[in-house]
Amino acid sequence: MTRLTFLGTGTSQGVPVIGCNCSVCSSNDIKDNRLRSSVIIENNGSVLLIDAGPDFRQQMLRERASNLDAILLTHEHKDHTGGLDDVRAINYIRKKVLPLYCEKRVEEALHKEYYYAFEENRYPGAPEFDINIIDSSCFTINYTTIIPIRAHHLKLPVLGFRVGDIAYITDANHIPDEEFAKLKGLKKLVISCVRRERHISHFSLDEAIEVAGRCNVPECYLTHLSHQIGKHSDLEMTLPKGVSAAYDGLVIEA
């Protein structure tokens, strides 16, 4: 059994957007309040975080989550890595260095952004990471097998991840044909969908639904949703059978 908790389901700006008074940003529906996209996946006793954006601390406190076995990073953009400084709380409370899995390019970006965590004479209290370099080949954490899925965020290579019968793909507008073999037999697919209209670096609503259909997956959940896609309740009414709009705090299992 694989369990996925949506920590955040919003775009890089989150929802509501600062200074915006649109119907979504001013909505009283809690499902229209979206922190930056991130999930926790639990499988075979392992607790894995995918991405740690600027809302990481708030998300962990909201879910009363106090422990992680590892962090997987999809790519280096700030809305997916901006909360990594708060890993130091886990370092301190749990007395352990936290394993982090990412591509070499992402590691290089982290060395620039969090230089103080990698210095020879590390600043006291700085976060501690044990970085493991990955590519699109499968790997194992404890007893959990992770299958990376190569995708593209415009020209930037990103990784999605399959754990058990759930796959999580965010910040993508293209998945190479050969990667779909890794998605066969899925029970649940989580995929980004920033808005209804076409976007330069993210799947549109129709494109995300097309990917779900190609995977022949029984259930698909849309994430990385912007305020441009409309209210959660309105969006749900327009979605085809088997496709749902995820929201912060939602838990799914497969």
Image (cartoon, rainbow, N blue to C red):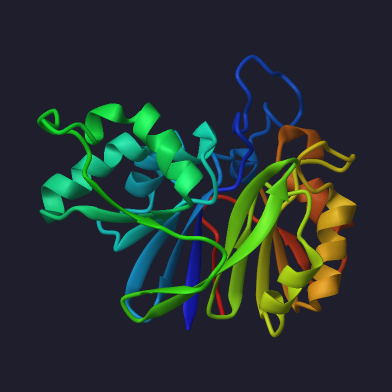
Q: Where is residue 61 in the image (x, y as percent from the top left)?
A: 32, 45
Please give left or right for residue 63 compared with residue 226 in the image.
Answer: left
Q: Viewer-proximal residue, 215 or 190?
A: 215
- Hey, which quadrant is residue 207 in on the image? bottom right
Q: Viewer-proximal residue, 27 or 137?
A: 137
- Hey, which quadrant is residue 188 in on the image? bottom right
Q: Residue sitting at 69 percent across and 85 percent down?
A: 185
In the orientation shown, which residue stands out farthest toward the top? 19
Q: Is residue 220 above or below residue 22?
A: below
How many numbered marks appear? 0
Q: Residue sitting at 46 percent across and 60 percent down?
A: 134
Q: Residue sitting at 62 percent across and 29 percent down?
A: 16
Please identify the quadrant where the C terminus is shown. bottom right
Q: Is residue 148 above or below residue 120?
A: below
Q: Residue sitting at 30 percent across and 35 percent down?
A: 85
Please give left or right for residue 212 compared with residue 71 in the image.
Answer: right
State whether residue 24 appears in this view: yes
Q: Viewer-proximal residue, 64 or 12?
A: 12
Q: Position of residue 237 (x, y in %)?
A: 85, 56
Q: In this view, does 138 lie above or below 175?
A: below
State whether residue 65 appears in this view: no
Q: Where is residue 72 in the image (x, y as percent from the top left)?
A: 44, 56
Q: Viewer-proximal residue, 132 or 89?
A: 132
Q: Position of residue 182 (x, y in %)?
A: 67, 76
